[in-house]
Amino acid sequence: MIARVTESPARAQVESSHVMDPRQFLASRTAEMQQQIETLCNINSGTYNIAGVERVQNQLIEWFAPLGGDMQRVPSAGQLLIDDQGRTVHQNLGPTLVISKRIERRPRVLLCIHCDTVFGPDHDFQKCRQLDANVLNGPGVIDAKGGLIVMLHALLAFEQSTYAERIGWQVVINADEEIGSPGSVATLHALAREADWGLLFEPTMPDGSMVSWRKGSGNFTLVVRGQAAHAGRDFAKGRNALVALSRLLVAIHELNQPTHPDWGDVTFNVGRVAGGGAVNVVPDLAIGRVNIRVRTAAQQTWAEAQLRRLVGEVSGDGIHVAVHGEFSSPPKEIGKRTEQLQRLIESCAAELGMPIQWNGSGGASDGNKFSSVGLANIDTFGPAGGEIHSDREFLRLDSLVPSAQLAAAVLVRLGDV
């Protein structure tokens, strides 16, 4: 069921002041943007902290209200997990905030970024602080609370301009991107299928370049079951699940072939193992968790085939292997419409005096999901910074206004496409 956000009496549409250039509106906004980012960073919104996620969304509802869009909270489908006993469990997740305005207009632009972070409420890293005149340090400061504020101010500038009536837009702020968006993916896909262009506000690369292609990412859980037996009296009757899993994981690791002409940039990372108990018992259960990254759809097909082959080789003689998981973020390859969007961005950036460079990335984003249903998108409209997912995470304050100016300029230009 979709929950509609109740409008407050203070909510009102931004009245057009006929600002012809949104850059003017944004030029002196660094201090306000910094204050808002600090406010968000000081609210813990680790993915599984649903109350914290909703607090961040409540603050965003207040800040986005002057835009005048229709606001809805879409409940999450949650996440299915395999625990260390091989059981399927359901994990609740926070809702997705969707804000829509003029969606009957074409083109329709989908603007997206997440409000969750990798830092849970028990993590030591909880507060934002300014390290020097240009550097802000804090949990999620660049990934992606800075992006939330850049998106907000880009839209505020756009809606103040005479260009606003040319396009429709939707904002989607999900609460589970850091774990692959399992509970919001259906909403993301549905909105992406109805849109013409996608702008996502993940941070730029540390050098300020924007991301073109992204690797796809798949998480897989391998549940290996054998036969328990007394290690002394009935050892031969046992079938050791932990040994079978160990052999399987070593074989998976050996699929990494950095010099191979076709599969060299495919990576298989064995990330976690659980199993065994008392040392006088042959273990009958072992769990392995693997992440696979691929550059192309062909590589994804190959990697999945290799995983099936190795599982088949280990299975049998009392050993059974169940594979759970998928490529929740397929590879984001560059098509013609994405190239068109890149050229448009380059043109806007040149007018702003900020030439754009493009790089690929091994990291996935919700842009992968948009691309998988055919929505051309660029997903690094956020500010610049670095040391993501560590307590050294930082944001460059001098990148805030230029990032918002570029996004606003692209919105203006998309009205003419």
Image: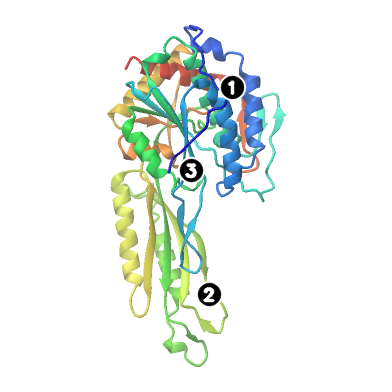
**Tag 1's secondary structure?**
loop
Inspect this view and state whether residue 173 appears.
Answer: no
- Gap between marks 3 and 2, in whole Å? 32 Å
The residue carrying pointer 2 sits among few (fewer than 14), some (14 to 19) or many (20 or more) residues within 10 Å by Cα, namely: some
Which three-letter amino acid code belongs to the residue tagged 2?
Gly
Q: Which residue is located at x 49 percent, y 69 percent?
A: 85
Q: Which residue is located at x 57 percent, y 42 percent?
A: 53
**Viewer-nearest of labels 1 and 2?**
1
Q: Earlier in the sequence, mark 1 or mark 3?
A: 1
Left/right placement of residue 165 relative to residue 9 reads: left
> What residue would you read off at disc 3?
177
Nearest the camera: 192 or 235? 192
> What residue would you read off at disc 2?
276
The residue carrying pointer 1 sits among few (fewer than 14), some (14 to 19) or many (20 or more) residues within 10 Å by Cα, namely: few
> What residue would you read off at disc 1?
10
Nearest the camera: 114 or 221? 114
**Tag 2's secondary structure?**
loop
Q: Earlier in the sequence, mark 1 or mark 2?
A: 1
Left/right placement of residue 280 relative to residue 169 reads: right
